[in-house]
Image: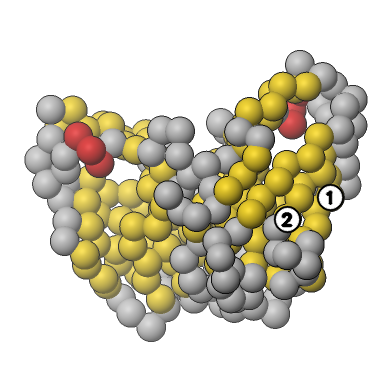
Amino acid sequence: DSGVTQTPKHLITATGQRVTLRCSPRSGDLSVYWYQQSLDQGLQFLIQYYNGEERAKGNILERFSAQQFPDLHSELNLSSLELGDSALYFCASTQGGGNTGELFFGEGSRLTVL
Amino acid sequence: GENVEQHPSTLSVQEGDSAVIKCTYSDSASNYFPWYKQELGKGPQLIIDIRSNVGEKKDQRIAVTLNKTAKHFSLHITETQPEDSAVYFCAASSPPGQAGTALIFGKGTTLSVSS
């Protein structure tokens, strides 16, 4: 158990809909990362937050947004969903804001868009 | 930004054999190179990492080598066991402060160890 909690574990929805994925980092961790894992693209970095502020941005679509709240949990919002958004979405956390430490991953939220 | 290429995408070995997975990176400023193992139904987990001031690091049956000049690094697993079967990801990251930097992963290698 990494200590990172993601909900929901599974989500099935229709094209055009909007969903919210939630992540609770390990106790004491200030950084939260979001990654998208699909079969052909591996682990794609979406966005990083550190202590409530956006720290780094990767290949995140404009239809996607994220935030980190004062209690350090984070939410990833996916809107106007398309079939291609079906993937496993991972949240990871680490104590610091740099990129040279171990990331602790949750078990992921599997999104299926029909 | 950083780009990480990983090969092979699949690797099948017999129990007891060695397995080697190779990665190349594009950003010469990258200074941290971890390897993650992902078992079925779980999130990736760090198994070993190496920093740019070190050429090789070993932890029991696994080792990682880094060639900064050529910008490539490799994972070596010796005496493979069935429980080594998983997806392995290499990654690279640049120092913070550069726009868009984070830990960037390769596309993964599915390792199958048959007994």
Q: Please indicate whether residue A32 sits to the left or right of residue B71 in the image.
A: right
Q: Residue at x 70, y 76 (%)?
A: B98
Asked whether residue A59 appears in the rendered view, the answer is no
Q: Is residue A61 above or below residue A109?
A: below
Task: Give yes or no for contact between labels 1 and 2 (Cβ–Cβ under 8 Å).
Answer: no
Asked whether residue A22 appears in the rendered view, the answer is yes
Q: What separation in Å lies between label 1 and label 2 (alpha carbons)?
A: 11 Å
Of mark 1 and mark 2, the one earlier in the sequence is: 1
Q: Which residue of the protein is positioned furthest toward the bottom in this rendering? A: B53
Instruction: Specify the subunit that label 1 lies on.
Output: A
- Quarter of the image with the N terminus of chain B is bottom right
Q: Residue at x 17, y 56 (%)?
A: B61
Q: Is residue A89 above or below residue B50?
A: above
Q: Quadrant of residue B87?
A: top left
Q: Quadrant of residue A33?
A: bottom right
Q: Amino acid at mark 2?
A: Ser
SS at badge 1: strand
Q: Position of residue B80 (x, y in %)?
A: 16, 43
Q: Residues within 10 Å of mark 1 (few under 14, many from 20)?
A: some
